[in-house]
Each structure stands twice: as C-alpha cells, then as structure tokens.
Amino acid sequence: MHDLVVRNGRVALDGGWAECDIGIDSDRITALGSGLVGRAHIDASGTWVMPGGIDAHCHLDQPNWGGVDTADDFTSGSRAAAFGGTTTIVPFAMPGPGMTALAALDRSLDRANGRSLVDYGLHGVMTQDTGADIKAQTERLAVRGVPSVKLFMTYTGFAVSDDLMLRVMDAAHEAGAVVMVHAENDAAIRRTTARLAASDRTGFRYHAVAHAEILEREATHRAITLAEVTGARLVIVHVSGHQAADEVRRGQMRGIDVVAETCPQYLLLTAADLASAPDEAARFIFTPPPRSRAGQAALWDGLADGLIGLWSSDHSPYRLSDKLPADRPPSFLTAANGVPGLETRLPILFSEGLVTNRLTLSRYLALAGGEAARLYGLDRKGRIAPGFDADLVLWNPDRRWQVRAAEQQSAVDFSPFEGLWLTGRPRDVLLRGRLIVSNGVLHDANPGGRFLSRMSGVPRHRHPLEETTPWLDG
C-alpha cells in the first residue's frame, strides 16, 4: 500500500499521455499503474497530471543596487511559483557591490532558509569585482552544489570584460559547470544611450533603441565564439528575437555546446508596447526589450524544433514606483529593469504552446522543466517516473481565466500580461508528495522547500582551442 495515490488523471509521461495512477511513498514516485491502493488518495478526474515545473532563471531577495529593492523575497516568490505550477526554482545568488560570488551564495542561502514554499537551487554570479581568484571561486561553487555561473556583458557594476569571460569559461570547463550569459554589447549600449540622452530622447520607447537587437546579436556571437575557444558549456539567457536565435543555431551547427533560453515576454510583447502612455509602457521595461512580431514567430519555431531549450520567467520583481519615480519624468534611463513572471510562466506555455498545438507534449515537457533538470543537474526533477520526486501539478485544461496582478501571489503590483486570457490553470500542486495548493487555494503554508545541491548535469565533451589541431584542416 502506498502512502498516497493520485488516480484517474490523464498523466504526461515521457512516451506520451497515459491513463494511470501514480503511487507515492515518502517523497518519491514509486509506481505507475492501474488500481493502485494508498492510505490516502487524490482524485485527478478531469485533470492533466504534469510534472512540477522548473524555473531556472528568476531573481528573488537581491541586494539593493541603485537604491532599488526587489519586491519578492523567497516567501512571496516561491508562493507565486507554486500557484503557477512551478515546484523548483533556481534564482541567482546576486552579489552586492564588491561582494565575492561565495559571499553572495552565503547571503542567498541565509535569505532562502526556512522561507521557500518550493524546492530551490542557486546560480553563482561573477562580476568584475567578485575577486581575482576566479578558478577557486568557481570550483568552490561547484563543490557547494552550484555548478552554474552567470555573467553579464552589460550593466554598470556587472559587465565583464572578454578577458574575465574567458577566465570564467576556462574555470567552468574544468569544474564541469555551466556558464550563463546575458549577451548585449555594453560599449554600444553606452554610446547609443548617451546620444539619445543628449537629444532628449529618453522616453520609454527609446529603451528599444538603446538596447537594439543588433547589439544582442553581436554579443551572442562573441559569447558563443569564446565558448568555442574554451570548450565551455554555454547558455544564452533570455534570447529576445530571431537575430540572437540565428547566432545560437549557427553555433549549434558548428557543434558548440550552447543552449538558448527565452521567456514569455518575448513571445507576447513587442517594441510597440513601449510607445504607449508612460503609465502603461512602464510595465514593459525589461532587458533585452521586446522585439517584433516576426521575431516572435522565429522564437515559436525555435521552441518547437528544439533550437531553444529553456523557457524561463526572468522574474525580476520591481514595483511600478521603481519604474515611474514620482520625483522625475518617465525615462528609460532611470526606470528599474525587469518584470514579474514566476506565476504566469507555465500557464502561458500551457495555454499558448500545448493547448494551441504549437508544441508537442514532449516539447512542452522539455520546456516546462525537463531540459532545465538535465542541463542544471536536477536529477530527481522534471519527470513523472519511478524514483523521481513526487512534484506533480494537476491542471484543469479547460479553465479560462484572465491574468490580473491583483489576484496573483507576487508582491509586485503589476503584470506585463494584465488582461491576457489563458486556457488551463493548475488546480492542485504537490511538492515531494505534499499537497501545497488545493483547488487553487493555498493548502499548506509551511515553507518546506529544500535547497538542492546540484551536480553537473551534462558531461563536458568539447576541448579548448589549444587542444585541437585546426592547422591540419585542409
């Protein structure tokens, strides 16, 4: 007899849909079959039973930069994740000014401990100021269960030089870690921003000019080239349109270990949204900015054919007041960058990808969390199979609902998707067999989320440039 049986649902398995029961003992799935008997049961009739989602790119409880605090800590952020069908999150251990990556990890572990409703890992972050001992810090991060490091190619206080990027990539290659890169050309952004400011073109619409798509394209090409030099495993985060996606495809065709990630905002919003009235346009200030309808079509194609492997929220919880300070006119120069998305990430993929048949079930499962689990070393997450954590989401596939910030769990006071109609919504959410959301209501507020110490997810297979023999070609 099992501790718990989820029965009568339509279950999403690796091989497709199945009408079966799920047996759970302790915190893991132990059986799939019919007529399973349990001490307790959940009737999943009329629902689609899916693996709990994994959002491997979100920001929670970060140090204050530029006088702006994040609205969501691990309590409110993890609650938003759970209500959106996400049972594992991997935020960034963001350093404060002058802080090492290891000190930032300690800070984030302290902030998360005893506060998260869902399980969580962390990514390290390296900047120009995180210290000279890059190799030692990267190795130590990996030993402590954080085999992933993020680099920013832009932003004051964060942008790394090519020299530092190469050093981090070399260290990550040796440690078996993943390098995540925010790819935009910082020098060109600073140059264009200064010219826009000099001519008083600082309204929100000019955010899309200062961070033009060609600048993302160039930086993406450069990051992929440096990964080719070092043999590093690379993720280009929040790919916003077809130009950066094309660079990733070319890199993959050359055999480079590069994965593209995109986010819902790039599939649903365009630069035209920035041309609306300031109170409205402020909801669409994020970086890279939204692009074009043609770019959206290319991203959907990439999600469907596997070019884009990761679907993340880039949840950046800043309030509208951080984008529209009362003491100055609206300006992209002073608006806080970022939008919330932890709660809407998976429902958007479900509604706009799976229900519309843009995505097959296998692609949906990969994007919902399967590929993130593989890449980032979450070896008990992302699948419904014996031995895996019993992280389950029972979806009502016919539920029609409208996104309303006032009804969501995040402490952020707006949504970039306000008013969007979606089909399908999580009814029940289980974390390791424990019911935390039931019938769309918080069932268990106990912050039982655990820190997930991760191993390297994918073995390295590329050699750095100096270990190959390109002079012999031809």
Image: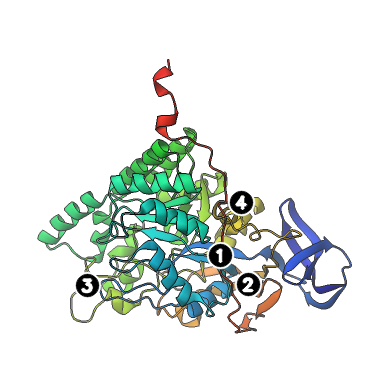
Q: Which disc is residue 426 wearing?
A: 2
CB within 8 Å, label 2 to label 1: yes
Q: How crowded is mark 3: few (under 14 residues within 10 Å), some or many (20 or more)?
A: many
Would you identify the image quadrant in which residue 159 lies? Answer: bottom left
Q: Say how many tags the image has.
A: 4
Is label 1 in a helix, a strand or a loop? Answer: helix
Q: How crowded is mark 2: few (under 14 residues within 10 Å), some or many (20 or more)?
A: many
User: Label 3: which residue?
Assistant: 330
Q: Which disc is residue 363 wearing?
A: 4
Q: Along the polypeptide, which appears first: circle 2 or circle 4?
A: 4
In this rendering, position of residue 27 left or right of residue 345: right
Is label 4 in a helix, a strand or a loop? Answer: helix
User: Label 1: which residue?
Assistant: 346
Cα distance in 3D space between marks 4 and 1: 13 Å
Q: Nearer the viewer, residue 370 or 286?
A: 370
Residue at 47% across, 35% down: 463
Q: x and y percent of residue 79 in the render?
A: 54, 78
Q: Tag 2: residue type? A: Pro
Residue at 75% across, 72% down: 26
Q: Tag 1: residue type? A: Leu
Cα distance in 3D space between marks 2 and 1: 9 Å
